[in-house]
Amino acid sequence: MSAFIFAVAALLVPMADPQADPAAQPELMDEDEPFFSNLDLFLFSLIAGLIVYWLIFRKKAEPIPEFKKLESTPQTTRETSFIDKMKKTGKNIVVFYGSQTGTAEEFANRLAKDAHRYGMKGMSADPEEYDLSELSRLTEIENSIAIFCMATYGEGDPTDNAQDFYDWLHEGDADFSGVKYTVFALGNKTYEHYNAMGKYVDQRLAELGAQRIFDLGMGDDDGNLEEDFVSWREQFWPAVCEHFGVEATGEESSIRQYELKVHSDLNMNKIYTGELGRLKSFENQKPPFDSKNPFLAPVTVNRKLNKAGDRHLMHLELDITGSKIRYESGDHVAVYPINDSVIVNRIGDLLGVDLDTVISLNNLDEESNKKHPFPCPTTYRTALTHYLDITNPPRTNVLYELAQYATEPKDQENMRKMASSSAEGKALYQSWVLDSCRNILAILEDFPSLRPPIDHLCELLPRLQARYYSIASSSKVHPNSIHICAVVVEYKTKTGRVNKGVATNWLKNKMPADNGHKATVPMYIRKSQFRLPFKSSNPVIMIGPGTGIAPFMGFVQERGWLKEQGKDVGETVLYYGCRYKNEDFLYQEELEEFEKTGVLTALNVAFSRDQAEKVYVQHLLKKNKEAVWRLVHMDNAHIYICGDARYMARDVQNAFYEIAEELGGMSRAQAVDYIKKLMTKGRYSQDVWS
């Protein structure tokens, strides 16, 4: 009220208008004019009346309620202190995971569930959600152990959720005396820095005084990651029992982590329909966009790149106008695909369920940060379509848990055998599941007596993950567009079934609409270390067969743009490989135009099947060895390799060893060391996959 009175009083004070004409203002008041006009007297009377009314009739001010400080509320503690949570819930095993594709998280959950079989209690934990400096306090909990399931991403990098933990370990100087730990590493032997993250965590914890109670486990995704994990796990738990003097309880029964709640009268606006984080985030898009909040990018171009052949190679362009998304050449675009409705419907038919039932799966552990296995409430159809991986072969723990629902003893026996660590069981799992590429639908079809409750199946299946593609454009040339180059995956399995790649087949059907409805792709950007040299004058040698050409389209576009800006641009050399010149020479017209205009100094193309003897990019490198060695050894060239890790990247690396030996006069050991030094200096970079 008092503010109102002052506001009214302020009306009586003449205010200067900065834009008014001074000549229009009266200079002096007329001497005969009374000091107060009738209007002034009226306004004073009004103000006086209001003041009297306020003093007599005003309500007494209500006391401001006191709020307790929030620093010590359970919610905050639950988010940052894993030690307090372990104490509160009686847990003595914590399993941290560094996971990019969900596998390490899956393994961590399995180890946490294992603990009850040994009279212990475990919890899995995302290092991003907790204060890892508390690790030294683990000694406050009796018979405690920290397990780390750490995946390595790219060229020896930590996964996104383990980056802060890695930085803290690298820079910190904690004392972990008395802390007991073990590490299981997940990686791929075809990569240069095999299991680098797991090895580093294992070594660094020991350096800081922690006690390793079981050897580092090494999981190789190029071989059989599941078998590596099961073998390590089968030896790990007896070592834990021996160390702590505990015995296995023999309890092997399936333990549910989530309970089913069916919703019958829930408002449809409160049901998740495919969003990854915030409800209705796809309807109401708000930056910043990331893995939990992807941007729905309209598809503006979707064209077939290859001119012939039985494969489908495609070029897509995603419109990011107005999204505030920024990217650099060499970055990856992550897209969230959805599963084929034919597979989803078939699972629903086999299990005899209404897929449109609205459900929630709620964590039985109320203290867990992970309340649901996927966004809930939702429908079975949405879960199987958007959230769950139904196309990859299921892991052994899924078979073990589902075995109880097989009514035919032989089916149950085979499923349990495949989930065991016996040599016979491992061989059966390898041949019947992995080699035959059986997904969950194929398993349900081939075990007719297996009809599990769909809610338990949804609990067990891993999450559907984003797919990463090297961006095939430069933001300097295409600031509002992201280009993707990919091959559509489709193949026949040993069982005669046709399996289709989830993301590529989904993208293939994302055609720019002409009826006003735009096809969109949920996406975000993942930053990469695959970067053009800081100095544009440095030469670059790019080696990318097949769809490995993708990032180099961005690199070449950017080098062309730099030239247009008048920059000094070094030699830009490309080694590209495909099967046939007239069939799958991707971006042929664009690349030949770049060569014609001088943006590409040299375009070297290996057509592997256009002649009797196979010719690959490594053969062309050795053919041009003098020019290659000059660029690398004399001119400070940067080398970039993109594509297949298992064969191509290794063969290319061997070609560089041979060139260094022959023209650099080195031994093989010296040549290997020479290339490794180039890697350390950031002059030999790889963006490869297997």
Image (cartoon, helix red, strand yellow):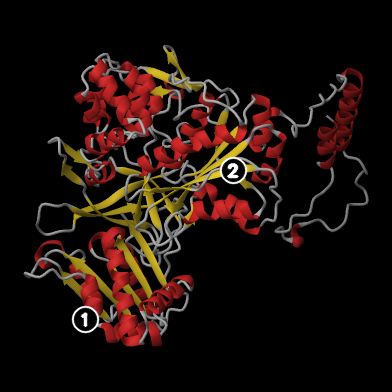
Q: Position of residue 75 (x, y in %)?
A: 66, 30
Please name the amino acid that badge 1 sits on. Lys
Label placed on residue 181:
2
Question: Element type at marker 1?
Answer: helix
Quarter of image, res 262: top left
Check contact, mark 1 vs mark 2: CB within 8 A: no
Label total for image = 2
658 left or right, relative to 74:
left
476 left or right, relative to 550:
right
CA gap, disc 1 to disc 2? 51 Å
Please name the amino acid that badge 2 sits on. Tyr
Question: Element type at marker 2?
Answer: strand
Q: Is residue 536 above or below residue 616?
A: below
Label placed on residue 623:
1
Q: Position of residue 331 (x, y in %)?
A: 41, 59
Of the pair 323 and 169, the residue shown nearer to us: 169
Report the residue at 59% width, 51% height from top. 164
Of the pair 582 and 496, the residue shown nearer to us: 496
Of the pair 519 and 598, the residue shown nearer to us: 598
Q: Position of residue 82 (x, y in %)?
A: 64, 35
